[in-house]
Amino acid sequence: MNAKTTRIIGWVLAILPSLLMIFSAFGKFTAASNPEMVEAFTKAGFYEVRIPLALFSLAIAALFLYPRTSAVGFVLMSSYFAGIAATELTHGMPMTVGPIGLVLIWISAYLRTPEVFSRLLGKTV
């Protein structure tokens, strides 16, 4: 696979979890108007902090997509999706969003910026 194809696949895989976070943020902003969303957020235990969480989600997506801050965005987005997986696991929800998001994030980070993994492993590029 050539470098251009690798970059394109990396960007497509980076955009998918970022869009998921952006749509999730807008869902958190508009949750008060939907009783089902209020119930789901209350059951998960974060209805009161949904607005700061939505703002945090938007910031993480921006950091992950911007090439100069993608390493920081990668770590934050990985942590965020791990939290989603933990919430799904502890509240008896089907574990879909968290693990799928994590796989997409890690593959896209590796394809877009392989030096991220070198930094995480303590190796110099």
Image: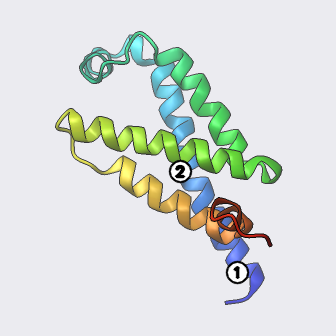
Rendered image quadrant of residue 92: top left
Upstream in sequence: badge 1 or badge 2: 1
Kindly identify the residue that appears in the image at 63 percent across and 37 percent down.
60
13 lies left or right of 36: right
Most extreme residue toward the left, as rendered? 92
The residue at which mark 2 appears reads as 17
Q: Which amino acid does label 1 sit on?
A: Thr
SS class of the residue under badge 2? helix
Question: Within 10 Å of the Cα at label 2, are there few (<14), some (14-19), or many (20+) other Cα atoms?
Answer: many
Kindly identify the residue that appears in the image at 31 percent across and 35 percent down.
87
Q: Position of residue 55 (x, y in %)?
A: 61, 23
Q: Where is residue 44 in the image (x, y as percent from the top left)?
A: 28, 24
The residue at which mark 1 appears reads as 5
Rendered image quadrant of residue 57: top right
The answer to whether residue 18 is above or below residue 6 is: above
SS class of the residue under badge 1? helix
122 or 125: nearer the viewer? 122
73 or 101: nearer the viewer? 73
82 lies left or right of 29: left
Q: What residue type is labelled 2?
A: Pro
Q: Position of residue 100 (x, y in %)?
A: 40, 57
Q: Which mark is residue 80?
A: none
Kindly identify the residue that appears in the image at 67 percent across and 32 percent down.
59
User: Which image quarter holds the N terminus?
Assistant: bottom right
95 lies left or right of 109: left
Real-space CA distance between mark 1 and mark 2, rounded to the nearest whole angstrom: 19 Å
User: Which image quarter holds the C terminus?
Assistant: bottom right
Q: Where is residue 10 in the image (x, y as percent from the top left)?
A: 65, 68
Question: Within 10 Å of the Cα at label 1, are there few (<14), some (14-19), or many (20+) other Cα atoms?
Answer: few
